[in-house]
Each structure stands twice: as C-alpha cells, then as structure tokens.
Image (cartoon, rainbow, N blue to C red):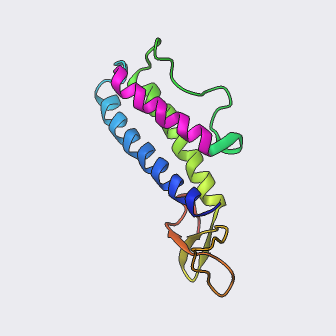
C-alpha cells in the first residue's frame, strides 16, 4: 500500500459505512421496500469503485459486481451486501496495519514526500482492528 491507497481506502470505507448506516435505518422500518433508483445508482457506483479497489483478493463475492437496476433490490438486500463489503475492507485494513508503542499505523511504501521513522516506516495513524483480541 501507498499513501494514495490509504486515502482511497478511507474515502471508500467511510462512504460504505455511511450508506450502510442510512440503509440500515430504512431496512429496520421497511426491510422489503425497494431501493429507489436514485439511491441505487450511487450504491452501485460505490460498489463498483470498491470492487476495483479491493481486487479479487478481498472482494466479498466473486459473482457479484452490482445490483441489477431492472430488478430493484430491497433495503435488506443492500444492507446485507454492504455489510459484507465493510467486513472485507476491515480485513484489508487489518492485513496492512501494525501496532507500535500502543498506537496503530498503516504499513505503507515510502514515497518522496513521506516522513520516514528510524525503522524506515511511514507512519499514518489508524484505529485498532475491530476484531483485535488483546
């Protein structure tokens, strides 16, 4: 990973979590209601960008690329899929971070603009992995 990968990760992951939270609220009220086409367009765009970023190694489902706009999914379907993407993003993050002196950092390749520590590591702080057991 490099600094741009981390920035892309944080953008996409933040968007996924935001859409997931919104869709979860809708799903709790009306799980079987169809997602409107306006929202579905943005959800599919986010999923497409996530698929490209995650690549085959972290993509949740090999045979899922986006929702069919002609066969509009229910709110609960979208929540299910987005939760899988969030878990895969967390797996990718967990595989690319390290703990040092009680803080968590991304393991990134060094670039010309980066501040490198004494171990030759670029420090970009992040949060503890969600499934970390102390």
Q: Position of residue 102 (x, y in %)?
A: 54, 80
Q: Quadrant of residue 6?
A: bottom right
Tell me if residue 25 comes above or below residue 5 in the rendering.
above
Q: Residue at x 57, y 83 (%)?
A: 101
Tell me if residue 19 comes above or below residue 118 in the rendering.
above
Q: Quadrant of residue 129?
A: bottom right
Q: Residue furthest left?
A: 29
Q: Quadrant of the N terminus?
A: bottom right
Residue 35 makes an appearance in the image: no
Q: Position of residue 77 (x, y in %)?
A: 46, 25
Nearer to us in this view, 58 or 25:
58
Q: Position of residue 61 (x, y in %)?
A: 64, 32
Q: Quadrant of residue 65?
A: top right
Nearer to us in this view, 100 or 70:
70
Question: Is 37 within the magenta?
Answer: yes
Residue 5 makes an appearance in the image: yes
Q: Quadrant of the C terminus?
A: bottom right
Locate residue 93 relative to residue 35 in the image: left or right. right
Q: Position of residue 73 (x, y in %)?
A: 44, 19
Tell me if residue 92 comes above or below residue 48 in the rendering.
below
Locate residue 26 relative to residue 68 in the image: left or right. left
* Highlighted magenta segment, given as a residue range: 36-53
Q: Residue at x 56, y 59 (%)?
A: 4
Q: Residue furthest right?
A: 57
Q: Residue at x 69, y 81 (%)?
A: 120
Magenta: main secondary structure: helix
Tally of numbered discs: 0
Q: Residue furthest front?
A: 112
Locate residue 36 relative to residue 79 in the image: left or right. left
Q: Residue furthest top?
A: 70
Question: Is 57 within the magenta?
Answer: no
């Amino acid at each position: 990973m490099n600094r741009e990968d981390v920035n892309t990760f944080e953008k996409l992951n933040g968007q996924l979590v935001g859409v997931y939270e919104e869709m979860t609220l809708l799903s709790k009220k009306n799980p079987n209601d169809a997602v409107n086409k306006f929202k579905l367009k943005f959800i599919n765009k986010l999923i497409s960008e996530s698929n490209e970023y995650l690549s085959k190694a972290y993509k949740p489902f090999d045979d899922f690329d986006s929702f069919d706009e002609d066969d509009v999914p229910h709110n609960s379907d979208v929540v299910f899929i987005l939760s899988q993407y969030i878990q895969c993003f967390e797996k990718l993050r967990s595989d690319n971070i390290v703990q040092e002196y009680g803080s968590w950092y991304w393991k990134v390749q060094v670039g010309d603009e980066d501040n490198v520590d004494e171990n030759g590591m670029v420090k970009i702080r992040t949060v503890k992995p969600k499934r970390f057991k102390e």
